[in-house]
Image: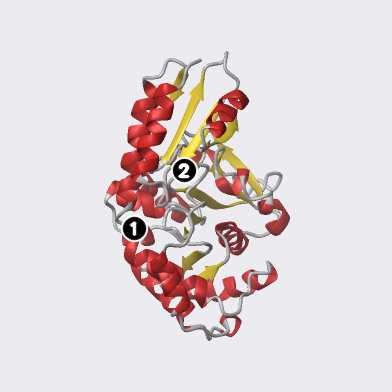
Amino acid sequence: MKINLISDTVTKPSQGMLKAMLDAEVGDDVFKEDPTVNKLENIIAQTFGMESALFFPSGTMANQTAINLHTNPGDQLICDKYAHVYNYEGGGVSFNSGVSCKLINGERGMFTNKQVLESINPPDFYHSPKTSLVCVENTTNKGGGACWDLDEFKKIKQTCISNNLSFHLDGARIWNAIVKTEKKPKDFGLLFDSISVCLSKGLGCPSGSVLIGSKELINKAIRIRKILGGGMRQVGYLAACGVYALENNIERLSEDHLKAKEIESTLSKLSFIKKVEKVETNIVIFEIKANISSELFLNILNGKGVELISMGDNKLRLVTHLDYSNEMHKSFLKILNDLKF
């Protein structure tokens, strides 16, 4: 039995999702004539209580488009040192928008309003980059699936308003945060100038993210998406997966969270584990003791059919997901308990 816990992006479309693809009505989305894409965009915009939405092939492209729209070359955005837009988007912040990052040393990928205030460059001091955008990520990927406190978002929003800054949410795993914290999507829609939401993380889609914002912002986003090569044709087949996922795969995320908590509990009792980060959603980050190399640990697990990912410094990450079955979970916990070093 192969157990792939590298990411929640490794899932395959279910039979129900494949049927939705086959039954999809499609058109040319570059001309905004794909009815299924239009349907998906309308559903997500309404879900978050925002005016408009635009379908993208990837979350990285959605984030990069938002950053481009909220900044000018030479500007600076504020984000955490663990932020996806800084660590995992190929340097696109600088390449695509000519923007630099002011990194905050937060906690598990999250920071405070006070830290934002301390990070804003004086607008009249022309020697430093102009601060124009605050980017946050919920849940935090490198922070182990941690969920932000909505009240902290509200404080940061007021700081953004007072300092004429835009506020963008990288919501790649926002669905996990919504299920875990029992907040409503509109709670987030009220606070952000733009939100990117992913359909291929957690929800089981093969591809796709959606950028949400005002009609004015999204109309501009269409041009940036085109420049970045994101114009797609009969993409309603993928959008149909998104519609299906929104209707069927959100509430079940709590199952992934429960399995991750059970893995956390098992790991914390093993003698060769140095530390397990607090688990809130579907990501488990743990550190093995220094006398065991992460390469050796991964090789042993690979030999037993289990795939994880290394984060360096003897830290490892695993992510529970739709295709990680109860049978796989039971088997994986036994494998962990049987390991000897």
Precedes in sequence: disc 2 or disc 1: 2
Give the vertical position of 23 relative to 112 (above or below): below
Name the residue carrying label 1: 250
Residue at the image point whose x is 56% and y is 58% from the top: 63
Which residue is labeled 2 in the image? 140
Instruction: Give the residue type that dot 2 points to.
Output: Thr
| x and y percentages locating residue 246 in the rendered image | 36, 65
Q: Is residue 52 visible?
A: no
Residue 279 in percent (x, y) is at: 37, 35
Its colouring scheme is secondary structure
Question: At 37% across and 47% down in the image, what residue appears?
Answer: 325
Q: Residue, x 67% and y 53% (percent of image)?
A: 92
Q: Residues within 10 Å of mark 1 (few under 14, many from 20)?
A: some
Name the residue at 49% across, 34% down: 106
User: Quadrant of residue 102 in the image?
Assistant: top right
Q: Is residue 323 left or right of residue 79?
A: left
Taking 336 as reference, is 255 left or right? left
Residue 261 coordinates in the image, percent (x, y):
33, 35
Q: Is residue 25 left or right of residue 298?
A: left
State the SS at label 2: loop
